[in-house]
Amino acid sequence: MDLEYGPRYEEFRRQVRAFLDEYKEERPSGSYFEVPRVELAQWLSLLIERGYWARTIPKEYGGFGAEPDLLETVIMDEEFHRQQVSRGLNAQGPSMLVPTLLAHGTEEQKKRWIGSTLRGETIWCQGYSEPGAGSDLASLQTSAREDGDDFLISGQKIWTSTADIAEMMFVLVRTEPDAEQHAGISYILLPMDAPGVDVQPLETMSGEIGENSFNQVFFDDVRVSQANVVGVRGEGWKIANTTLKHERSSLSSNAEGTFLRLVRLMGSERNRGVSVMASPVYRDRLMKLQARMLTMKYHAMRMLTCHLKGESPGVAGLIVKLQNCQLSYDMALLGIDVMGELGVLYEHTKYERERGFWQAQAFFALGLIIGGGTAQIQKNIISERGLGLPREPRPAKA
């Protein structure tokens, strides 16, 4: 078996390394929540221009316009991870909405929103969950009534990440009240500055409140043009599932980058003058995590191959979110253990490591085991749709 990439791909790797050597210091110094929007847009525009971000998005919609190539994707990810540089913007707009618009949007919607989203000029939030509709999303109650060419939307969404900074929301709304539960839902693009939108922050288990965390959003007769419906009115459930597929993939990304960061931490932390990496107990835990990380990395390549061939991955596509979210959490726990008593420090105290990355990552990864479809729901989907097992019994009605 020949595992060499070959001269063409090694030349491509050399080009990626040369770009990073020249420009990596120009990357934004913080998350996209923290840096000025102009600085973020300049960096992302540079990545698009060179083809390292939005590589296969058509040029007419603001991307680079290259043909899909599995090995080029792998090489770019490997080199950017090694240099600790983010290859683009892992946010709800680029990772979830853009592929949905490419599949279902009108030409006007694609040209208006995809480019600005890829450049970080338009930040999006997702309006799916409601207080009474989380895992059972089809029972959502947020509704719209017609008023000429517009909808007037009323209702509530919850657990809405980044709603406090977003310019736009892609939201599920019941537009056909007499239709069956999974029918009658429309997928709508909603401006967050429209009159009647009220965003209220929620405190998380890590103590965060606001600051680009979770929010609840209330709608009181919010006026939105019917031209903002993506796809066919009343068929939003099908479109929502396109978004959910990409959401599960985005929630499981960057396992390799986190693993390399963990290796660096174990190499720098010392216990009584001895590197933590010298401990056989910690090294054994690290190697087990490496095996899981590599398994999921190559599984992701399998998924990408299916996508490029237009094939359905079947049951293989159902395990990605479940496995990777647990892997991210387990890596964060090892990072905290490696720091010993310093692992409990938080909120930028004197001896804190990496500005509290590992503590924040542990909370965040634990939340992702619930978010985007809980682990229990994922296991039900795998057993029922993938393995053909009987459906879970439903409680008897009173």
Image (cartoon, helix red, strand yellow):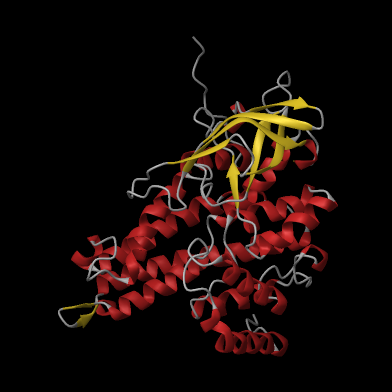
Work out whether residue 269 or residue 29 is closer to the camera in this orientation and state it: 29
Q: Position of residue 58 (x, y in %)?
A: 80, 65
Q: Is residue 230 visible?
A: no
Instruction: Return the residue found at the far left.
Output: 272
Q: Is residue 196 above or below residue 82?
A: above
Q: Is residue 70 visible?
A: yes
Q: Position of residue 337 (x, y in %)?
A: 26, 64
Side (left or right) of 261 relative to 82? left
Residue 187 placement: quadrant: top right
Work out whether residue 382 or residue 369 is closer to the camera in this orientation and state it: 369
Counting the numbered discs, the total is 0
Residue 39 placement: quadrant: bottom right
Work out whether residue 8 or residue 98 is closer to the camera in this orientation and state it: 98
Residue for point 54% across, 30% down: 133
Residue for point 53% across, 57% down: 252
Q: Is residue 375 above or below residue 130?
A: below
Instruction: Return the residue found at the far front.
Output: 195
Q: Position of residue 297 (x, y in %)?
A: 55, 66
Instruction: Return the residue found at the far right.
Output: 107
Side (left or right) of 277 relative to 43? left
Work out whether residue 75 or residue 343 is closer to the camera in this orientation and state it: 343
Quadrant (top left/top right/bottom left/bottom right) for the N terminus? bottom right
Residue 265 placement: quadrant: bottom left
Q: Position of residue 20 (x, y in %)?
A: 57, 84
